[in-house]
Amino acid sequence: MDRDRSGAISSHELQQALSNGTWTPFNPETVRLMIGMFDKDHNGTINFQEFGALWKYVTDWQKCFRSYDRDNSGSIDKNELKAALTSFGYRLSDRFYSILIRKFDRRGTGSVTFDDFIQCCVVIQTLTAAFQQYDVNRNGWIEINYEQFLSLVFNMKT
């Protein structure tokens, strides 16, 4: 993977190494999110130790993805995505799942590929964590002013 033999893996090298099962390049935004999550020394690359953690993360997501890709199509449709996120504890409307499919379906097929599935889950997890900081009563409702909302959005790591 370390094509330039620098001792670290760049986002370009990681994108080339990963497969989403569709013979297309791994989503660059998903690669950026993963590098951001595992680049502990914040140098923009993944060293050997960081790569070990990232690789475990990717293989765990791959097992999860395959378990919800019930028809083995190589992508997850709206119902399969709903089953996956429901098992993670999310209770969302069918309308919202349609929004998620539109947002993360880069190919326009009504389903999401493996790399887009990772991105979707990471974004939902990040947004949920940000929301929970303001949900002081833990009842699923927050009250924030406009500046707090902007701060919430601009301080997110997505």
Image (tube, helix red, strand yellow):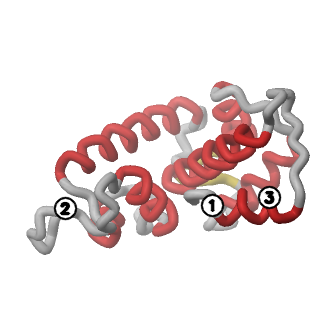
Disc 1 crowd, CA 10 A, few/some/many (<14, 14-19, 20+): few
Residue at (39% x, 44% y) in the render: 58
Q: Secondary structure at mark 3?
A: helix
Q: Nearer the viewer, mark 3 or mark 2?
A: 3
Disc 2 crowd, CA 10 A, few/some/many (<14, 14-19, 20+): some
**Alpha carbon separation for disc pair 3 and 2:** 42 Å
Image position of 135 with respect to 8: above or below:
above
Residue 1: which numbered mark, if any? 2
- What residue did someone put label 1 on? 155
- In primary-sequence order, the first of circles 3 and 2 is 2
- In primary-sequence order, the first of circles 2 and 1 is 2
Query: In the image, residue 23 lies at what x, y percent?
Result: 41, 63
Query: In the image, residue 88 lies at what x, y percent?
Result: 64, 28
Answer left or right for 46 relative to 106: left
**Alpha carbon separation for disc pair 1 and 3:** 10 Å
User: Of residues 158 and 131, which is closer to you in this image?
Assistant: 131
Residue 34: which numbered mark, if any? none
Query: In the image, residue 102 lies at what x, y percent?
Result: 75, 60
- What residue did someone put label 3 on? 148
**In the rendered structure, which amino acid carries the disc numbered 1?**
Asn
